[in-house]
Image (cartoon, rainbow, N blue to C red):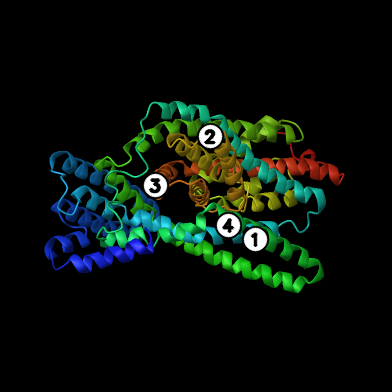
Amino acid sequence: MSITKLYTGISNFIVELPNDPINHVRHFFAMSYWQSILAFVFVVITIASLVFIYKKWGRQKATFAAFGIGIIGAITFGLMYQFTNTLLNELGYNWVSEAELWLKLISQIFLGLIALVIPFYIFTSIIKVINYKGGASMKGKTYGLSFVMMSVMIIIGITVAFVLFPLVKVINNNINYMPAIEPFSGDHGTEETIISIPEMIVGWVPYSLTIFSSTTYIVAVIVLAIIFGGIIKFTKKTNPEASNKLYNFFDHFSTLINVFFRWVMVLIPFVIATRLSMIGLGVNWNYWKGSLGIVAVYFLGIAILAVIMFAITYFAMQGNNRLKRYRKNIAPLWLNSFINHNVPATVPVTTQTSTNLGNCEEVSIFNTTLGSTMGMAACGGFFPTLITLFAMDATGLATPALLAFAFITIFLISFGSTGQASTDIVVLFTSLSILGFSHEQVDTIITIAILLITFIEPFNVMIDTTGHVTVATVAERYHSKNKHLINPIDSLPKL
């Protein structure tokens, strides 16, 4: 929605109000029918209930409660949709369009806030990666090898998703996807349409910010971050004090951005409950149906990634009983990753796993800590790529040129996204925006991804941490040869 449409809509409401005050006021509040009033009440009760559950039992319980509330809402609105009259009123609206305005209110505010913070998120993350201090004692090629291997982990994740793309096409070939803008999406009329309160909120304020997620701005952000990061790094030799001050400034700013982003993620249960209830109105039902098939493809990809990382680690390991040592030490790491759902939280266990596999402590600490900043094979590579390919094929955008562009785009965005629990959402949202998806499509696809992430995030973290151990093992093989060290595995007792 443009500022012109916002101004025109409000002006028309004021001008037309005396002619039909009752209908215009009802439409202004998007409550022309008892069904749309019920939708508003449902949103209010959902917010109050989830706030109580969130404060009482935490986010995880609130998320599962959101599923229950969403299913109840979907059944309720589905029955209303089937058995009540949905004819348009005098102003060209029906209760379904008004109900949707309220039900998608939270999700579109959520996406607007993400659009606002993503450029700063990527900018500060790239600077921190370039000036990463964890490897101060690791010089030269060993230091660079770890960065290269972390990037390779992302590329492997993206590549596996592309390899499985034919299966995605098979799933989509059996589904007839709806257009980007649904018949009752709230985007009705012309510039002269009288605007409603929820349209004012979700139509202008949040989505005016998505300009920051366009191709031009994101590319500019990445380039500027690389330049600033390089300046800070090379200034360190000539003026270390100034370099440290600049780095500390961006470090504090990055902390502020991450805190803000975590606050935005608090909205996830509310998004799940309200958007899930819209299924009852038939909104984007085919996208939801297609996502069920994507789950099967996802787990196949996770299995392939696990095998690839095992193979790389096995051939990079030194000493005897490599298979037995790997199997014995990887199980605790997977269990810890499954419980924590967050890569940075698993760093101590990941480091210990790497050390137990025979990697020296210096290499293990550096690589597993670096892994909390980059190298997300699943969260930053495989999962967002799989969902992006699903969306591209469903909307007819899967041309060879755009697929190649998507590969490069996702890699660059993933490289500049820190290892927080929201990495997959950041990469997916930014890639969809850059590839030209409409607001309605992004809203639908991100909502589906959030629902999937609720259940599959532990598996993403398992693969990410396994990849970091793999990188540490490869770096250790080079590191020990480069320093002519006796392999520390020789001093370990036989299993």
Of callouts 3 and 4, the N-terminal one: 4
Spatial CA distance of label 3 from label 4 is 22 Å
Q: Which residue is mark 3?
A: 447
Spatial CA distance of label 1 from label 2 is 30 Å
Can see residue 356?
no
Of callouts 1 and 4, the N-terminal one: 4
Spatial CA distance of label 3 from label 2 is 25 Å
Of callouts 3 and 2, the N-terminal one: 2
Q: Position of residue 341 (x, y in %)?
A: 50, 48
Can see residue 15?
yes
Q: Which residue is mark 2?
A: 399
Rendered-image quadrant of the C terminus:
top right
64 sits left or right of 150 in the view: left
Q: Amino acid at mark 1?
A: Leu
Of callouts 3 and 1, the N-terminal one: 1
Q: Which residue is mark 1?
A: 224
| Tally of numbered tags | 4
SS label for mark 3: helix
Which label sits in the foreground, 1 or 2? Answer: 2
SS label for mark 2: loop
348 sits left or right of 233 in the view: left
> Dot 2: within a 10 Å radius of its alpha carbon, few (fewer than 14), some, or many (20 or more) residues?
few
Q: Amino acid at mark 3?
A: Thr
Spatial CA distance of label 3 from label 1 is 31 Å
Q: Which residue is mark 4?
A: 122
Q: Amino acid at mark 2?
A: Thr
Which label sits in the foreground, 3 or 1? Answer: 1
Q: Nearer the viewer, residue 260 or 225?
A: 225
335 sits left or right of 277 in the view: right
